[in-house]
């Protein structure tokens, strides 16, 4: 897989960017979910804040499931 940008690993996961947007990967480089975002933060206590392309925000879990939309 090609990454346009990568973040550092934090508790077994890293942020990554491809031509579709930002997402999270595991230590082997596998994506955790298919969705892409405009911006993302690392996971903390199993959850991450992400910004969608319409600038709305949501909190997702490590499987990419939406927990809260703000």
Image (spheres, rainbow, N blue to C red):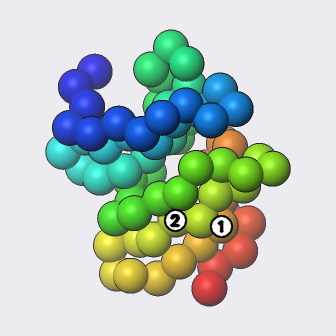
As drawn, 61 above or below 38: above
Which element carries disc 1, helix, strand or loop? strand
Which element carries disc 2, helix, strand or loop? strand
Residue beneath the point at 56% across and 25% down: 26
Residue beneath the point at 53% across and 77% down: 57
As drawn, 65 above or below 33: below
Q: Nearer the viewer, residue 61 or 10?
A: 10
- Which residue does the numbered mark 1 point to in the structure image? 59
Q: Quadrant of residue 17?
A: top left
Residue 37, horizontal then vertical, whole percent: 39, 60
Task: Give the label on residue 50, or none.
Answer: 2
How many marks overall? 2
Residue beneath the point at 65% across and 67% down: 59
Whichever of labels 2 and 1 marks the residue nearer the N terminus, that label is: 2
Residue beneath the point at 77% across and 47% down: 46
Tell me how far mark 2 sits from mark 1, CA to CA: 6 Å
Task: Give the label on residue 2, or none.
Answer: none
Q: Nearer the viewer, residue 68 or 50?
A: 50
As drawn, 20 above or below 27: below
Q: Quadrant of residue 48?
A: bottom right
Residue 63, horizontal then vertical, whole percent: 66, 42
Residue 61 visible at all: no
Q: Is residue 56 left or right of residue 12?
A: left
Q: Residues within 10 Å of mark 2 (few under 14, many from 20)?
A: many
Residue 3 visible at all: yes
Residue 18, horizontal then vertical, whole percent: 25, 40
CB atoms of marks 2 and 1 within 8 Å: yes
Q: Residues within 10 Å of mark 1 (few under 14, many from 20)?
A: some
Quarter of the image with the N terminus in it: top left
Quarter of the image with the C terminus in it: bottom right
Residue 5, horizontal then vertical, whole percent: 27, 39
């Amino acid at each position: 897989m090609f990454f346009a940008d990568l973040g550092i690993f934090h508790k077994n996961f890293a942020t990554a960017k491809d031509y579709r947007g930002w997402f999270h990967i595991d230590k082997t480089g596998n994506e955790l979910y298919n969705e892409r975002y405009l911006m993302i933060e690392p996971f903390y206590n199993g959850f991450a804040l992400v910004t969608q392309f319409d600038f709305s925000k949501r909190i997702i879990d490590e499987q990419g499931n939406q927990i809260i939309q703000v």
